Structures are given as structure tokens and as C-alpha cells.
């Protein structure tokens, strides 16, 4: 029975479960599933410089979501440590060779140890990936008004055209980075 | 919010974080694989999630289900005319998503799984959100 909890889940199991988050939260008081809103609530909780955009009752608006976010950290502990998968990720061979060509050697774990370590922050590449990468995610999500959960899942589930446009934008940026910029960054 | 509600959202979030780990969508490697179209996995996850989302929202709308407060469930629509913000904002997000290999949800799940350095992208993302807030009147929407 525990094998089910430690082994990775196929897309046709994980996807529907993630999708169920949408009605689950809607039925819990009309809450819209969207993780990036929490970044906005966190900014509003301190609002240094009194930025107008963050002047709202973040406690009323965000309590539920921040709690959900705290839960996701717990879920990460359970899923990634307590019930960790002892096997490596079954990555496509072409991706592995692509990344090897770009200089990656360690394919263990969920994230490349060569980029995701405190020592990597001492390198230009590490700084770029962790700091600039994080910054772009935070800036872009707020600019677009949502991230993968907000637009690609919630928005598309509600058949919102705006979310479809946002997801197209996600892929424009993602493909630009993958094919044009990352090879430069990693070399 | 009552304690039982805090518990409810905490449990929902925990389940969400757990599924994120099991589905491996938190993996930088999986994101690189996704943007190279080298596997159906990520598309299967997002696609079936959307399918389930579409069906469940249609059921909710048609059955006129009421929320815990007794009012019907309504979903505020997004303004589709704001094409610039969706394309520009979306592209910036996409650049970051591919670069970091993680979007907000996975960042926090990874934190829970012990990737302590993900605190840096989290702080950077907060800074990015803050910067947008400060600059938004100067940006095209």
C-alpha cells in the first residue's frame, strides 16, 4: 500500500487530482485556486513604501490562501521526504542528452544540485537561475494576474480567454528561455 | 476564520503539495523536458487537470450550488481585452518558469521537501511581485 505513496504518480492520476482543487476551493466559499496571489498577500502584509497596489485587506482576502500555501509546504515534506520516491525521475533520454550537452552532469533528485545549492549562489549561473528566475516568476505572475494554477488551471477551467492568452505568453517566454537564452546561460 | 476552516485549507494545501511532489511537476528537470516537448507527462497533468476543472465548474454552475454562506458560487471573469498584460506578463513569467524550473506552487512544495536554497527564489519572487506593484502604472496593460 505504501508503494502507491512513494512511487511517482502518472499524469492521469495526478492531473485529475490537481484539477479537483478547483471545485474543492470553489465549494469552500467561492475561493479561486491560484498560488501566486499569496506573493501579493505577503507583499501587502509588509507594504514597505506604501505601494497602492498592495493597499487592501490582505488578511480577509488572503488568510485562506496563505493557510493553503503553508499546507503545500507540509505536502512537500510528506511527498518529498516522508514518502519519498527512492528511484530517480524517469526523464526523457533526449532531455538528458540536451542537458548533458549544456554541461549538466548530476541528474539526481528533483532539482540539479549544480544549480540549486547555497554554494551555487556564488556563481553567476546560480545567481541568474535562483535570483533572476525567481524574480521573473514573481513579476510575471503578478503582471499577468496569475501563474500556472491561476491561469493554466483555474482560468482555463473557467474557459477564460484572458487565461488562454496568458498561457500562450507563458510558452512564448518558456520557449525563448529554453531554446535561445538557457544555452547561452549554461555555457 | 474559524479554526476548522484553517484546518480545512491546511489539509487541502497539504494534499496539493503532496500531489505536486508525486507528479514531479516540481522538478526543474521535468520543466526542461516540458519546454522541449520531450514527454507527454506535464501536458497530461495540466491537460487532465483542466478537463476535470472544466467539468466540475460546469456542474457547479448548472446545479446552482450554494457556498457555505448560502450564496450561489460565482467566478469573477478576467478581462480578455487586456491582451498586453497577459502576453507581456505571461512571457516574463514563462522566462522565469523555464529558467528556475519552478512556478510558485512548486517553490513552496520544494521548500517543504528540504530544498532550503529555494528560499532565495521565493524571496526573489516576492521582490518581483513587489516591483510589479510599484511599477504597474508605467506598464502597458
Image (tube, rainbow, N blue to C red):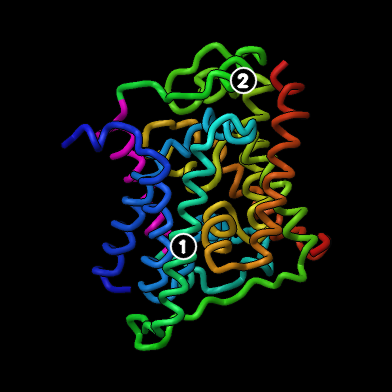
| Magenta-colored stretch includes residue A74 | yes
As helix, strand or loop, the secondary structure at mark 2 comes to: helix
Residue A170 pos. (x, y %): 67, 48
Using the image, determine if residue B93 lies above or below residue A126: below
For the point 52% across and 76% down, the residue is B75
Residue A143 pos. (x, y %): 70, 57
**Going by the picture, which residue comes out furthest to the bottom?**
B70
Output the chain of dot 2.
Answer: A
Whether residue A73 is visible: no
For the point 42% across and 68% down, the residue is B56
Q: Magenta: predominant secondary structure element? A: helix
The front one of A41 and B72 is B72
Give the left or right position of residue B109, taking residue A58 as reference: left
Residue at the spot of label 1: B53
Quadrant into which the C terminus of chain A falls: top right
Using the image, determine if residue A64 lies above or below residue B22: below
For the point 16% across and 37% down, the residue is A1
Residue at the spot of label 2: A122
Using the image, determine if residue B105 lies above or below residue A179: below
Q: Which residues are magenta?
A: A65-85
* Nearer to us: label 1 or label 2: 1
Amino acid at each position: 500500500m505504501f508503494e502507491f505513496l512513494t512511487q511517482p504518480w502518472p499524469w492521469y492520476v495526478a492531473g485529475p487530482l490537481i484539477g479537483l482543487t478547483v471545485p474543492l476551493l470553489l465549494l469552500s466559499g467561492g475561493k479561486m485556486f491560484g498560488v501566486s496571489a499569496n506573493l501579493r498577500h505577503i507583499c501587502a502584509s509588509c507594504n514597505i513604501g506604501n505601494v497602492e497596489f498592495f493597499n487592501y485587506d490582505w488578511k480577509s482576502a488572503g488568510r485562506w490562501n496563505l493557510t493553503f500555501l503553508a499546507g503545500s509546504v507540509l505536502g512537500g515534506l510528506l511527498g518529498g521526504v516522508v514518502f519519498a520516491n527512492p528511484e530517480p525521475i524517469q526523464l526523457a533520454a533526449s532531455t538528458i542528452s540536451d542537458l548533458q550537452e549544456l554541461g549538466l552532469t548530476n541528474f539526481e533528485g528533483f532539482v540539479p544540485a549544480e544549480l540549486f545549492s547555497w554554494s551555487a549562489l556564488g556563481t553567476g549561473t546560480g545567481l541568474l537561475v535562483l535570483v533572476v528566475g525567481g524574480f521573473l516568476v514573481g513579476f510575471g505572475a503578478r503582471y499577468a494576474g496569475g501563474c500556472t494554477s491561476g491561469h493554466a488551471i483555474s482560468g482555463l477551467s473557467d474557459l477564460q480567454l484572458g487565461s488562454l492568452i496568458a498561457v500562450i505568453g507563458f510558452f512564448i517566454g518558456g520557449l525563448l528561455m529554453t531554446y535561445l537564452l538557457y544555452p547561452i546561460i549554461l555555457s | 476564520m474559524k479554526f476548522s476552516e484553517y484546518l480545512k485549507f491546511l489539509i487541502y494545501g497539504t494534499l496539493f503539495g503532496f500531489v505536486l511532489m508525486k507528479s514531479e511537476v516540481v522538478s526543474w528537470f521535468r520543466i526542461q523536458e516540458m519546454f522541449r516537448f520531450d514527454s507527454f507527462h506535464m501536458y497530461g497533468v495540466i491537460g487532465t487537470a483542466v478537463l476535470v476543472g472544466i467539468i466540475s465548474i460546469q456542474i457547479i454552475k448548472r446545479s446552482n450550488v450554494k457556498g457555505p454562506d448560502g450564496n450561489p458560487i460565482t467566478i469573477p471573469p478576467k478581462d480578455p481585452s487586456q491582451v498586453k498584460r497577459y502576453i507581456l506578463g505571461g512571457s516574463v513569467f514563462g522566462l522565469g518558469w523555464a529558467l528556475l524550473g519552478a512556478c510558485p506552487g512548486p517553490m513552496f512544495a520544494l521548500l517543504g521537501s528540504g530544498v532550503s536554497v529555494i528560499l532565495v527564489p521565493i524571496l526573489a519572487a516576492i521582490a518581483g511581485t513587489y516591483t510589479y506593484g510599484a511599477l504597474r502604472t508605467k506598464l502597458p496593460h
